[in-house]
Image: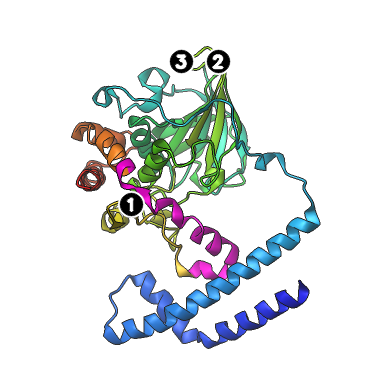
């Protein structure tokens, strides 16, 4: 094993030296500026691409080798936070939405009756994920999760479109201004977003439901739904909204003790983090530019290939090349690209027909609910409608 690792590292170093500093800089600068290379540059890019693929392959082997070694050292101990539910007894991924035209996409799955109130009290900070978050209680005793930063708006809009066609989502609400009492003197993350007297701007509030308990995560590759139409439809929805952050840890399983219309508990499967939506097709150079970016969303490619049997979508794509210097992150992102590939054409048409039932006003309500200004509401809605039209032309 040691000899193998040393051999891989030796060849990786030689290839990296062959990729001169000027070549890497030129490639990265080209991607950053998103310019169009001339014919000579294209030929050079092809040669560079082949070498980059070799480097990526070796880096992936190195990452896998180190992971196997590390796993052997750690044994079989699993942290509670990594617990996964792979074979639930009563799995629920999708429910028939009924008459989609009656769904209120401004208030979303929680409706107007569950909308947040006015008085909130700080409970504790949540250090999971990449965005600043903390829990609060309102005056009725209801618990909420406050999320700050670039994901607040896109996640609110995404939750409504995904819910509209029958998938479960969190009850998310966007608030342009929020005041929280008993804020601590210092947050570990997002302190610069807190104003005087606990005021915060442009936040997402997620409501915790009574009788609901998170019991684990679920995997895209191995789950209770196999190659079902419903799972494939969810894959299409992720492409529709350009949600590129499809790590398994962003999928949750909730146990609902008394779900509506059922006397027995259910295991509800959902994509619980939709914040990386409506931006680039893969992780970009900047955190904010990859999410809720109308220009990037509007210029991105939706369908990359279609045959008589399958459809390939352009989401998720590989991350920006700068992440090649973080092999674990780069290779893990490459491993997600299959989620948007080889989706049966009939399943794509099925979800497209459901989406086609949404009215123009409903689509725009999803973005109004997220606090986007009128011109961005119209811009995002037009891209969504164009993509729905593409699905229904297949």
Read off the magenta span.
Answer: 322-347
Secondary structure at numbered mark 3 = loop
Examine the residues drawn in magenta and state their main secondary structure. helix
Question: Quick check: is 325 in the magenta stretch?
Answer: yes
Judge from the rendering whether residue 330 lies leftward or rightward of residue 231; answer left or right: right
Residue at the disc numbered 2: 264
Establish if 383 lies above or below 175: below
Which numbered mark, 1 or 2, is in the foreground of this view? 1
What is the spatial separation of the Cα atoms under label 1 and label 2, in whole angstroms? 37 Å
Q: Is residue 361 above or below residue 378?
A: above
Q: Is there a contact, CB below 8 Å, between mark 3 and mark 2?
A: no
Q: Position of residue 48 (x, y in %)?
A: 43, 81
- Looking at the image, the residue that sits furthest to the front is 308
Q: Secondary structure at mark 2?
A: loop
The residue that label 1 is drawn on is: 310
Cβ–Cβ under 8 Å for marks 1 and 2: no
């Amino acid at each position: 094993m040691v000899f193998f690792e040393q051999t891989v590292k030796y060849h990786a170093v030689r290839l990296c030296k062959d990729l001169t500093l000027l070549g890497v800089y030129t490639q990265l600068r080209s991607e950053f500026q998103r310019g169009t290379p001339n014919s000579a540059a294209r030929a050079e890019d092809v040669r560079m691409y082949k070498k980059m693929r070799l480097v990526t392959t070796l880096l992936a082997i190195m990452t896998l080798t180190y992971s196997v070694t590390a796993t052997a050292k750690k044994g079989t101990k699993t942290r509670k936070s990594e617990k996964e539910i792979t074979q639930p007894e009563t799995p629920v991924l999708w429910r028939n939405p009924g008459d989609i035209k009656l769904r209120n996409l401004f208030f979303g799955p929680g409706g107007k009756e569950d909308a947040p109130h006015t008085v909130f009290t700080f409970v504790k900070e949540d250090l999971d994920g990449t965005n600043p978050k903390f829990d609060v209680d309102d005056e009725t005793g209801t618990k909420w999760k406050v999320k700050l930063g670039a994901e607040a708006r896109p996640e609110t809009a995404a939750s409504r479109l995904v819910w509209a066609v029958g998938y479960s989502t969190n009850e998310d609400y966007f608030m342009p201004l929020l005041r929280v009492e008993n804020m601590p003197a210092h947050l570990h993350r997002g302190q610069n977003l807190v104003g005087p007297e606990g005021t915060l701007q442009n936040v997402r509030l997620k409501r915790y439901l009574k009788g609901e308990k998170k019991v684990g995560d679920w995997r895209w590759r191995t789950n209770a739904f196999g190659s079902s139409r419903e799972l494939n439809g969810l894959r299409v929805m992720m492409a529709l909204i350009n949600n590129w952050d499809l790590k398994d840890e962003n999928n949750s399983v909730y146990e609902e003790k008394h779900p509506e219309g059922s006397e027995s508990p259910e295991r509800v499967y959902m994509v619980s983090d939709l914040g990386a939506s409506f931006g680039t097709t893969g992780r970009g150079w900047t955190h904010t530019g990859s999410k809720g970016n109308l220009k990037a969303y509007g210029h991105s490619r939706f369908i990359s290939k279609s045959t008589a049997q399958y459809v390939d979508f352009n989401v998720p794509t590989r991350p920006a090349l700068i992440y090649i210097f973080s092999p674990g992150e780069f290779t893990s992102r490459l491993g997600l690209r299959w989620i948007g590939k080889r989706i049966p054409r009939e399943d794509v048409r099925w979800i497209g027909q459901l989406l086609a039932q949404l009215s123009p006003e409903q689509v725009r309500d999803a973005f109004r609910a997220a606090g986007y200004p009128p011109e961005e509401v119209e811009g995002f809605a037009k891209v969504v409608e164009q993509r729905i039209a593409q699905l229904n032309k297949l």
